[in-house]
Amino acid sequence: MDNSIRIDMKDQPFITCKGGNALWDSSLMFKRLSPLMSPTGKEELIPAEVIVCRKCGKVPKFFYDKAKEIPEELRSTCENSIINP
């Protein structure tokens, strides 16, 4: 018996910002790992992928709510909404 749930993605809503933007970009932020904490004994740069609003260039609330360490100055102040396809 197949107990898997089938989800039709065409029935799922898109997320937009209040400004009407529905397009998002993937960007990288980097964290610096001190040589004292690095397993190599050298400074390391650790990439962290973030999503940014293509309109304002900042990280939307739906993303920074899950990634609390995003700096305040990079957080978008526009609210997110959900629109139906």
Image: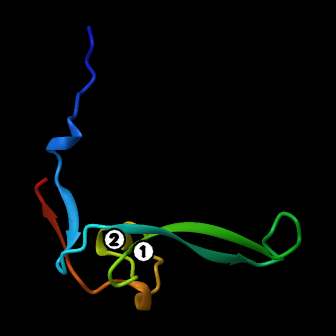
On the image, numbered disc 2 is attached to which residue? 65
Gap in Å between the C-alphas at discs 2 and 1?
Answer: 6 Å
At label 2, which amino acid type do we have?
A: Asp
Residue at 14% of width from left, 43% of height from top? Answer: 11
Q: Is residue 57 above or below residue 2?
A: below
From the viewer's perspective, is 48 left or right of 20?
right
From the viewer's perspective, is 61 left or right of 33?
left
Q: Is residue 67 above or below residue 11?
A: below
Q: Secondary structure at mark 1?
A: loop
Q: Residue furthest left?
A: 84
Residue at 42% of width from left, 91% of height from top? Answer: 73
Residue at 10% of width from left, 56% of height from top? Answer: 84
- Across and down, in percent, residue 34 comes to 77, 78
- Across and down, in percent, residue 8 comes to 20, 35
Residue at 16% of width from left, 53% of height from top? Answer: 13
At label 1, which amino acid type do we have?
A: Lys
On the image, numbered disc 1 is attached to which residue? 68
Quarter holding residue 38: bottom right
From the viewer's perspective, is 12 left or right of 52?
left
